[in-house]
Image (cartoon, helix red, strand yellow):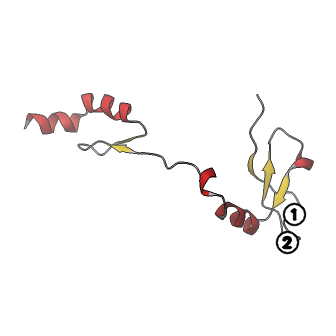
């Protein structure tokens, strides 16, 4: 299966391709399994500028975190918290008091 397009840390000795910036390249945008001559090369400043302007509808959803009220352990799904609560030692101690 082909890799997805991504931001890749690079040390290629070329200038930034954004609006004739020409600062030293730090990142490339492309597929790691694709030809490097098709990558878009960016300096750190231009990469940060581009990432700060991503439209809201393209930004990833924040990850919901579920926390055990008794021991403080965190989980990424409510079912994992429910499963944990059955065996949580801190919960058992609190319930038996």
**Residue at 89% of width from left, 71% of height from top?**
20
Q: Is residue 27 above or below residue 5?
A: below
Q: Where the N terminus falls, by quadrant? A: top right
**Residue at 53% of width from left, 48% of height from top?**
61
What is the crowding at mark 1: few (fewer than 14 residues within 10 Å), some, or many (at least 20)?
some
Left or right of 42? Residue 59 is: left
Q: Secondary structure at mark 1?
A: loop
Asked which quadrant contains residue 84, the reply is top left
Left or right of 14? Residue 29 is: left
| Residue 63: x %, y % from top left | 48, 46
Q: Where the C terminus falls, by quadrant? A: top left
* Residue 21: numbered disc: 2
| Residue 26: x %, y % from top left | 78, 61
Of 84 and 52, nearer the camera is: 52
Left or right of 11? Residue 59 is: left
| Outermost residue, right side | 37
**Residue at 27% of width from left, 33% of height from top?**
85
Pointer 1: what residue?
17
């Amino acid at each position: 299966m082909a890799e997805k397009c991504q931001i890749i840390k690079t040390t290629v000795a070329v200038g930034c391709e954004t609006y004739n910036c020409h600062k030293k390249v730090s990142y490339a945008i492309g597929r790691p399994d694709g030809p490097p001559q098709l990558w878009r090369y960016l300096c750190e400043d231009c990469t940060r500028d581009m990432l700060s302007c991503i439209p809201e509808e393209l930004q990833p959803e924040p990850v919901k975190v579920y926390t055990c009220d008794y021991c403080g352990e965190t989980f990424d799904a409510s079912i994992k918290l429910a499963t944990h609560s059955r065996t949580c030692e801190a919960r058992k101690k609190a319930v038996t008091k």
